Amino acid sequence: MAYHQTSYFLFFFPLAVLCYQLTPERHRWKTLLFFNYLFFFFISKKLLACLLVSSALTHYVGLWLGYVKARHREILAQTAREERRERKQSLKQKERRIFLFGLLVHLGLLLFFKYTGFLALNANFLLGGLGVSARFTIPAWAAPVGISFYTLQAVSYLADIYLGKMEEDTNLGRVALYMSFFPTIMEGPICRYTETARRLYSGAPVNWENLTRGSQRMIWGFFKKLVIADRLDILVKTVFNGYVQYDGAVVAAAALGYTLQLYAEFSGCMDIVIGSGEVFGIKLPENFRQPFFSRTASEFWTRWHITLGAWFRDYIFYPVSMSGFAKKLNRNGRKRLGPVYGGIPAAACALFAVWLCNGIWHGSGWHYIFFGLYYFVLILAGNILEPAVKEFSERRGIDRACAAYRMWQRIRTFLLVIFGELFFRAVSLRAGFVMAGKMFANFLPASFTNGTLLKLGLDGKDFTVAACALLLVFVVDYLHERGFHIRDKVAGWRLPLRWCVYYGAIALVIVFGAYGAGYAPVELIYAGF
Amino acid sequence: MEKLKSILEAMHPGVDYDTCTTLIDDHILGSFDVINLVSDLEDAFDVEFSPVDIVPENFNSMQSLWQTILRLQDGE
């Protein structure tokens, strides 16, 4: 089962909403928890045990941390002011050990399920290179769907208690709900405890407004997923799986196609997820904010998979930046290199940790690690070059705020994103380099006009439908970027017109969706991460 | 407070730090700037920032930054 399948939106979701609503308010959280676990059982079967273990671990380590912190607060309150800082440091060590225990168990589970095969494969490669005949067995076990997402949620819960951002929750049910909310378990968004837990537990009734607004958002998600993403998948799969036989122009078209597919797929899925949450009265965090309007790679990651970027910023970038090593490096760097460039080495360390983790988080393959480090280089280079670009622009009288310059920045960022996605989607790192090489060394523009693109699984009608749908998504994104909120506008229209729009949107999905004869079912891309 | 203002002005001149309350929200201070700023503030005011102090609310204005420094000096 997945969010875009009929088994979800015609059966599971309506049944969950109905049972939730029919349950007395104070017991609704139990109904929700039951459906969370039922959903997880459908997608991961007996690996449901992993989620149960992770939830219990998160709860009890949180309680332990909370108890120790409270005890330490009492000790500090009785400590003389001049000794307080030193005493605080020593007490913090114990809190750190408890936090690290919870962190390492969670990361250990993630490593075991998701990366053992990758590690064994690379260890075997190394052993082969060293002439050792012994080999590790490549494990064949599957990882629980969503483990990458709920692990980050668990870690943020424990980190926030450890850092003193919030108190531990003594209610196991609330922690379990937070860890398992079925609309978010497969692809996120990665929620923070303070954003969703209490609302999930409150058992607020489903009301008409939430039901209609949530459903509208879901329809828009189905449109992006079924009309655009699943249609483009055919072309993308054909080229990426058989890249050897295509020239650079076809590869470039496929890289563009994949970038658009991924955006339509992931943001569409987020529309379905956020809409599902809205029906229950849960406001989930947004994961996309018109990413293709970004002017830099750095800005792109504040608009694309926002909750992941924010997680890495809060739990890796700043903690690494605030470590003793990074602070020392920063001071020394600024003494030797001056105030403009001196801070770069320390920031680069934190940035490297972020993007290495980002790449590894996305999957167990070298091409994912390359993808992460690609953005490390882009963002670091952007920061290093910024003072020089600024000075050059001022000297040459270039207005960096003018529309033309901003447009150039957006196009440049879009092209850089497409290039990165080529490696992200490639079947291996080597394949990524071969495909990138073709774009520079074997680019045949004739492929765009001689019908080659029509031999990749999509006919002229498919291209027309995809192009029109993408144009519609672009217009909607443009309006959002300008601060114009379409749903609010449509909600203010008279009833007949309003319902014509809603029925029209449903009809578009039914008529133009890439499903049924001639189209293979397409799994959710991010559910695989 | 004047010392804080001079540190901020050395980092990004031309900003009205007396009235600006969106230093982070308007991207006047980026994440690289925050790291450099923390280093300067720790040296200037003998305080120690931890990751929990690095939140937009503490860095959005000179006033909020000053309050954060006072709190850290107080050993809270």
Image (cartoon, helix red, strand yellow):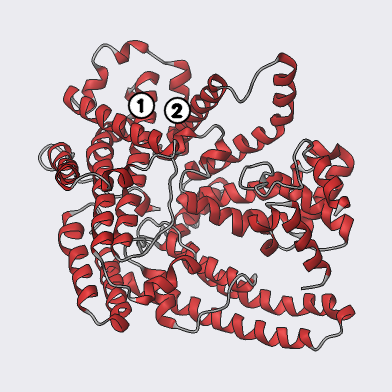
Question: Which residue bears the numbered disc 1?
Answer: A244
Q: Please tell me how crowded label 1 is: few (under 14), some (14-19), or many (20+) other residues with Cα within 10 Å.
A: few
Question: Which residue bears the numbered disc 2?
Answer: A434
Tell me where residue A418 appears, x and y as whole percent. 45, 31
Q: Is residue A464 above or below residue A153?
A: above
Labels 1 and 2 in the same subunit: yes
Q: Please tell me how crowded label 2 is: few (under 14), some (14-19), or many (20+) other residues with Cα within 10 Å.
A: some
Tell me where residue A213 appears, x and y as whole percent. 27, 55
Which badge, 1 or 2, comes first in the chain's sequence? 1
Is A313 on the left or on the right of A72, as rendered?
A: left
For the view shown, which residue lies furthest in the left direction?
A517
Q: How far apart are marks 1 and 2 (CA)?
A: 8 Å
Which mark, by number, is residue A442?
none
- Relative depth, front residue between B68 and A364: B68
Q: In this view, does A12 lie above or below B44?
A: below
Residue pictured at 43% horizontal, 50% vertical: A287
Label pair 1/2, CB-CB below 8 angstroms: yes
- Relative depth, front residue between A365 and A528: A528
Give the secondary structure at mark 1: helix
Residue type beneath disc 1: Val
Which quadrant of the view contains residue A198?
bottom left
Residue pictured at 78% horizontal, 68% vertical: B71
Residue type beneath disc 2: Val
Tell me where residue A357 appears, x and y as whole percent. 56, 52
Residue B25 visible in this rendered orientation of the protein: yes
Tell me where residue A210 appears, x and y as whole percent. 28, 61
Residue A348 visible in this rendered orientation of the protein: no
Give the secondary structure at mark 2: helix
